[in-house]
Amino acid sequence: MELSERVLLHALAYLECALGFLCFTLLTLVGSPYGRYVSQRSAWRVRATTAWAVQELPSLAVPLFVCFATAAERLGCWPNRVLLAMFIVHYTQRALIFPFLIRGGKPTPLYSCVLAFVFCAYNGYLQSRYLSQYAVYAEDWVTDPRFLTGSVLWLVGMLINIHSDHILRTLRKPGETGYKIPRGGLFEYVSAANYFGEVVEWCGYGLASWCVQGAAFALFTFCVLLSRARQHHRWYLEKFEDYPKSRKTMIPFLF
C-alpha cells in the first residue's frame, strides 16, 4: 500500500507540472476568467469573498485532516513539521483571513471557483500526504543551506504577497469607483507585485522541501501567475496613458 501511494504521489507531482504548462498555454490564449476580465454576461457567479474562502479551503482542510486522521509518521521529524507548517500558514491566511479583507471584489464565475477548489484539494493532498508520510530528511536538514535559503525566500515572498494585496485593497478611498495605478512597494518595479511575492514564496518552499512535489507546486504557481501577470501588464498599459513604462511585468528589472 505504501509503495503504491508513494508512486501515486510522484505521478501526481509530474502531472501537476504538466498541468502548469497546460494552464499557461490556455490562459495565454484565452485569458484568465476572473476579476476585471469576467464577462458581465457570465452566468452562475459567486461573491468574491465566498469564492475565495471556499476555493482555498481544501488546501487547509485536507492537510489538517491528513495530520490528525492518518498515521502521518514523518511528522515526528522537524523538517517535515516545518515544511508542512509553511503550507498550512499560507492557506490559513488565504482561506480564513484574505477573503474577508476584500473590498468590493467582482464576482467569480462558478466554474472558475470549482476548478480552483478541485486543484486546492489535489495539491493539498499531494503536499501534505508526501510530507507527513513519505518525505525522508536528515535531522540536520533544518540547518542545510537549501532549507535555510528556501525558508527565508518563503517568508519574504509571503510578506511581499500580503503587503502587495494590502496596497491593492487600499487603492480606492471609501466611495470611490474605477481603477487606479498601484503605487508603493514592489509595484514601483512590476505590475504584479502580489504574484511575484507568491512565486518567490513557493519557490522558497520548493527549495526547502527539495522534492519533486514541492518543485511541482512552485512550477505550477509560476506558470499560472506569469500568464495572469502578463494579462494585467497589458491591461494597465492599455488603460492608463501615464502608466510607468519602466515597470516590468512580474520579475523586477528582468521581465
Image: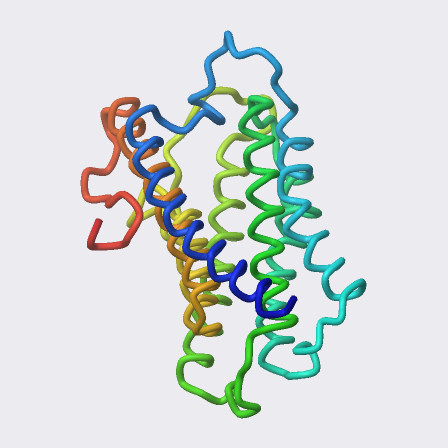
* Left or right, residue 70 beside residue 134: right
Name the residue located 72 percent from the left edge and 61 percent from the top edge: 66
| Residue 160 place in picture, x, y as percent | 46, 57
Q: In the drawing, does residue 140 fall left or right of residue 92?
A: left
- Residue drawn at the location 47% of the way across and 64% of the way down: 214
On-image quarter of the N terminus? bottom right
Numbered disc total: 0
Towards the viewer: 178 or 19: 19
Q: On the rendered structure, is 81 left or right of 15?
A: right
Look at 41% across and 63% down and name the residue there. Answer: 215
Residue 207 x/y as whole percent: 41, 71
Quarter of the image for residue 73 reads bottom right
Residue 149 in the image: above or below residue 234: below
What's the image's color scheme?
rainbow
Q: Nearer the viewer, residue 2 or 58?
A: 2
Q: Position of residue 28 (x, y in %)?
A: 29, 32
Query: At which x and y percent is residue 193?
Result: 39, 48
Note whether 1 is above or below 180 in the view shown: below
Q: Nearer the viewer, residue 90 or 16?
A: 16
Residue lying farthest right?
69
Q: Closer to the camera, 134 or 43?
A: 134
Point out the residue furthest to the bottom here.
Answer: 140
